[in-house]
Structure formats: C-alpha cells, structure tokens
Image (tube, coloured by chain):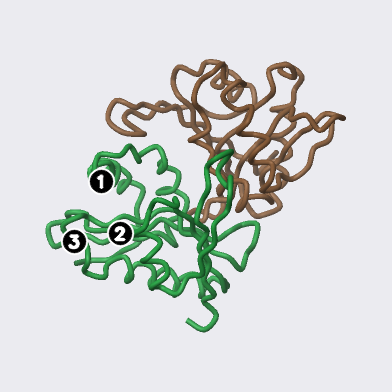
Chain colours: A brown, B green
Amino acid sequence: MITRNIKEEDYYKVINVLNDWWGGRQMTHLLPRLFFEHFQPTSFIVEDENEVLSAFLIGFVSQTHLNEAYIHFVGVNPKDRKNGLARELYELFFTKVIGLGCNTVRCITSPVNEGSISFHISMGFSVSLSTDYAGLGQDCILFSKSITTY
Amino acid sequence: MITRNIKEEDYYKVINVLNDWWGGRQMTHLLPRLFFEHFQPTSFIVEDENEVLSAFLIGFVSQTHLNEAYIHFVGVNPKDRKNGLARELYELFFTKVIGLGCNTVRCITSPVNEGSISFHISMGFSVSLSTDYAGLGQDCILFSKSITTY
C-alpha cells in the first residue's frame, strides 16, 4: 500500500468506483472535481501495489474558523475494509492539520449511517444530532473531535 | 440592497430558492452546507431592504495553489437580473482575494450555459473547453482571470 497526497487526476479514479463502493448509491454528485484540485495538502489516497484505489480522504482547513479542519468525504474499497485504512487516513489528516494550526476536526453523516457513527465514536469524536441541518426534514449527525492532545 | 459576508444560516435561505432560480432544475446538491460554514470570508450575499435574497457568491482560496481563488457558485434572483449584481459580487470577491494574496481567479461552467460564458467573457475571463473534465462525456468550460492588475 502507498499513501500519498491526492492529485487532480485522481478525480477520475475515485468517481469511477464511488457508486460501486456505496453499493450502487449515487454518490458522485457529492464529490465535484474542485475537491481534488483545491484541497490537496489535506487530502490523501491509498493505492495498492498495482495502483488500484484502496481508500481516500478529502478534507480541508476551514477558512471561517482557522482552528478547525473538516473531513468532507472518506471512502474505502470494499475489498480493503476492516484493515484500519480509514483510521490511518484520519490519523494522517489529524497530524497534517495540527501542523496547520488546527485544534478541532469536524465532519457529518446521515443518521442512517450506523457504520460511520460507530467508526467516529471509536475514533474519539463526540456525536450530536442536528435537526433539519441539511434542510427541512434532513437531520444530520455532527461529529467533533479535539486534536490538541492527539 | 445590503451586501455582507455569508453566514451559516443563510444556507436555508439559499437552498429554499435555488431550484426556482434555475427554472426548476435540481441544483441544491451542488451546494452543501459546508460551503456556507467554512468559506465565509470569501462568500457574500445581497439582500433587499426586506431581507429577501437578491444574489449570492460562494468562493474560496485554493489550498493547493495559494495564489488562486475559486468561485464555486453564483446566483441572482430572477427579479434582480440585469442589474449588475453578479458583477458587483465578482468585484467584491476579486478585491477580497487580492488581499489574501491571490493573483488568479478560476471557475467553471457547463458548455450549454451560454449566459455564464458571455458574462465571464465580459468580466475579462479567458475561456477554454476541457473535454471529459467532470467525467467521461462531461465537458466543461474553464474560466481564468488574472487579477494582479485588477
């Protein structure tokens, strides 16, 4: 496995598999190419020895709250799940954004996404429900973690 | 008209009208709440005296190319079009990001969006077609403008 910062051309590699990784759910609209172009210092990709995509993380530093970093999207190839790749990518992200002056990491998920909720709790994130967060009737789970002592 | 930096709660105000402003096209998926939360210093809203939304611009500074700023989304209320609001928001954005060290502004649109192409040419952007930019068969028009002499 090789882990490196994401490149713009990785966009194709990711969108070509994204819906399959989510069991056929349409996900590509959540990940426009701008995220691969403009947030490379804090976004990472893991490939196997044949350059097959194993996992990726797209994140950035908030430009409103300079002490906060935000993880927008994380995906792991179904064949590589349960191997700790998501945890490794999160830890890499924490280390990077601490170096950029951040002390808090935030992300969100849907209330139905039990796997994501369990994962974030295991990573030490606090969890709260925000009603109508993404619009009327569209509740979200908000995750927050202090990384000052990470 | 009052122009101000965008706030997180403006998210609701924008998504409630966005599809209508685009003639019923489904657009809200392109504008998740994170853009209202994390890019406030470079994103702006114009309201009329009754706090009715007239226009907005969502942009940010690239974290990959620190000299580049990116305009992700601009909308103008149909009743307020042809009044120069988009131009005003672009000029406000240029001034802001020059102050943040940028010398280039980029944005994209679909080849079918003739109004957007005309507007960006009138604003002095250079224009190029990028084949398969957003995926196979999904060409995009890329706009770029030097703002060093703006």
Q: Nearer the viewer, mark 1 or mark 3?
A: 3
Amino acid at the residue labelled 2: Ile
Residue where numbered disc 1 is placed? B13
> Which residue corresponds to the image point at 40% horizontal and 43% vertical from the top-left?
B31
- Within-10-Å neighbours for mark 2: few <14, some 14–19, many 20+: many
Q: Is residue B70 left or right of residue B33?
A: right
> Which residue corresponds to the image point at 51% horizontal and 65% vertical from the top-left?
B127
x and y percent of residue B97 in the render? 50, 70
Amino acid at the residue labelled 3: Asp
Residue where numbered disc 3 is placed? B80
Whether tag 1 and tag 2 are in contact, CB under 8 A, the answer is yes
> Which residue corresponds to the image point at 25% horizontal and 46% vertical from the top-left?
B13
Q: Is residue A18 left or right of residue B74?
A: right
Q: Nearer the viewer, mark 3 or mark 2?
A: 3
Amino acid at the residue labelled 1: Lys
Identify the secondary structure beneath mark 2.
Answer: strand
Q: Of callouts 1 and 3, which one flags the residue occurring earlier in the amino acid sequence?
A: 1
- Which residue is at the front of the view, A92 or B143? B143
Q: Is residue B96 above or below residue A143?
A: below
Q: CA distance from mark 3 to mark 2?
A: 13 Å
Q: Of callouts 1 and 2, which one flags the residue occurring earlier in the amino acid sequence?
A: 1
Identify the secondary structure beneath mark 3.
Answer: helix
Q: Which mark is residue B45?
A: 2
Q: Chain of mark 2?
A: B
Q: Of callouts 3 and 2, which one flags the residue occurring earlier in the amino acid sequence?
A: 2
Q: Chain of mark 1?
A: B
x and y percent of residue A128 in the render? 44, 27
Q: Chain of mark 3?
A: B
Q: Are marks 3 and 2 on the same chain?
A: yes
Q: Are marks 1 and 3 on the same chain?
A: yes
Name the image quarter holding the N terminus of chain B.
Answer: bottom left
